[in-house]
Image: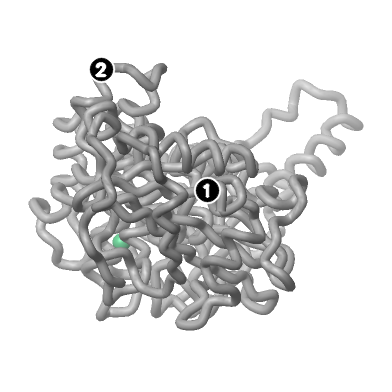
Amino acid sequence: MPDSLAHLTPSLYLCQAQHHRPIAMKINPFPRSIRYFLSVISLAAWQSAYTQELLELNIEHRCVFTGSKMDEELYRFSADDGMAKRVEEILTLGGALSNFEVVQTNVENVSAVLDGEKRYLLYSLDFVQKATEIEITGALAHEIGHHVNEHTFDPEHRNSEENEADQFMGYIFSLKAYSKADIETCLNKTPSSYNIGVEDRLQAVWEGFNRAERVLEINSLAFDGDPRLAELTMPGFPWPPPSCHSRFELPEKLFSGIKTLGETDRKIRSALNAKGYTQYSYFSVPGGFAIVTQLEQYNGEDGSSRNDRTRWLDYPARDNFNGVMDYLKSLVMPQKGHFRLFVFIVTNQPFGGGANRVSKAQATAWLSQGFNKLPGSLAKVPFSSDYNVTALVYEFEVPETNRKPIQRCPSPLFDARTHLLKVGILTGLGF
Ligand SMILES: [Zn+2]
């Protein structure tokens, strides 16, 4: 340590005991004037790197990646540049936006904390420097998974939230191309802090891992007619559809003369394309299929579409096609906003509304499991008068006050028919 730093209070060191000591600069080779300058610089650098303040946090709602302890007194240490890059990479791979603050502090490894409305990702530089790459990725992905899924860390949700965080971790592991053997070794080495067995955790991790693989597989298919598409199993839409939607049965006459499910799909798709919808996902439903549109912002006063500039503004285009529901969980809107998405269900089976709302787990499935085209095997199925085409509208609102998207339930702002008319889809279908 340079002499010039000797006057600093010992407490500064005390709190830093587990962190790096500053690198002592060799100042002797320099002339006296430069030496003074350097010592001032080194003092400034040392202070910025090692000064910390008490981090006053309510840590009751938290997940500790491994272990359970958390020091009573947490200190905020200045950020490590490499960490921002790591976090950014995981968010990008996970298709999520940041909804938390990253703080270097004296935790055991990595921890997610929800203090009131504010979320923190806490990490220890010691851990980052001693752990392997896969351990760092796993710990960060798990804890980030808690935040982007807006977990509560309440004891009654602990198991399902840990499961969802592990799924997110598996999703990231897969996209980072870690092998299953390495992942298993890593998980055995870093046991859950919440008495969840390795077998159960691995199951959650593989679920996320496989989902990522499926997304990559679907995206790699270049053409609608690619025969490999038929070999993939189209994921199922939650059935019966989650509650809190408005519903409109499209009149039979709109589909007169239609001979196959593929033609039905083309008719709906061209009405959607004409109105600017370019992203949608396909799901199977009993006796048919469902098309889920991209989430869009609309005018709360009359249900009309926002102009092109703002309609999709907060839903940046992505390379992967999953861009529907995840934004609901991580979106931060500058002002009050109204959002909707349409689900067109083509089936010869009767259905009612499900008892549950769209849960986070279901929403995650919607975004990452849908196909971007109707498989040829289904497209060939004959369409008859037994089939109904039903439009469901799910509405969400981002209130100015808390900026969190909430599902409008039970009474939607407009009925489904009004939404379809206002956006011009009904006209496009020949209504
Ligand atoms: Zn956790």
| Image vertical order of residue 167 relative to residue 15, above or below | above
Q: What residue type is labelled 1?
A: Gln
Q: Is the Cβ of the residue at disc 2 closer than 8 Å to that at disc 1? A: no
Secondary-structure class at tag 1: loop
Residues 242 and 179: in front is 242
Residue 162 lies in quadrant: bottom left
Q: Is mark 1 within 8 Å of ligand 1?
A: no
The N terminus lies in quadrant: top right
The local crowd at label 1, few if under 14, some if 14 to 19, many if 20 or more residues have their Cα within 10 Å, is many
Residue designated by label 2:
227
Q: Residue at x 52, y 31 (%)?
A: 319
Quadrant for ligand 1 reads bottom left
Q: Can residue 236 be seen in this view?
A: yes
Q: Which residue is drawn at 49% across and 61% down?
A: 329
Q: Which residue is drawn at 22% across and 29% down?
A: 377
How far apart marks 2 and 1 lie (CA) works out to 26 Å
> On the rendered structure, is 36 left or right of 107?
right
Residues 208 and 68: in front is 208
> On the rendered structure, is 137 left or right of 117?
left
> On the rendered structure, is 63 left or right of 34?
left
Position in image of residue 213 (x %, y %): 28, 32
Residue 350 lies in quadrant: bottom left
Position in image of residue 352 (x %, y %): 27, 71
Q: Is residue 136 visible?
A: no
The tally of labels here is 2
Q: Which mark is residue 294?
A: 1
Position in image of residue 87 (x %, y %): 50, 44
| Image vertical order of residue 413 relative to residue 388, above or below | below
Q: What residue type is labelled 2?
A: Pro
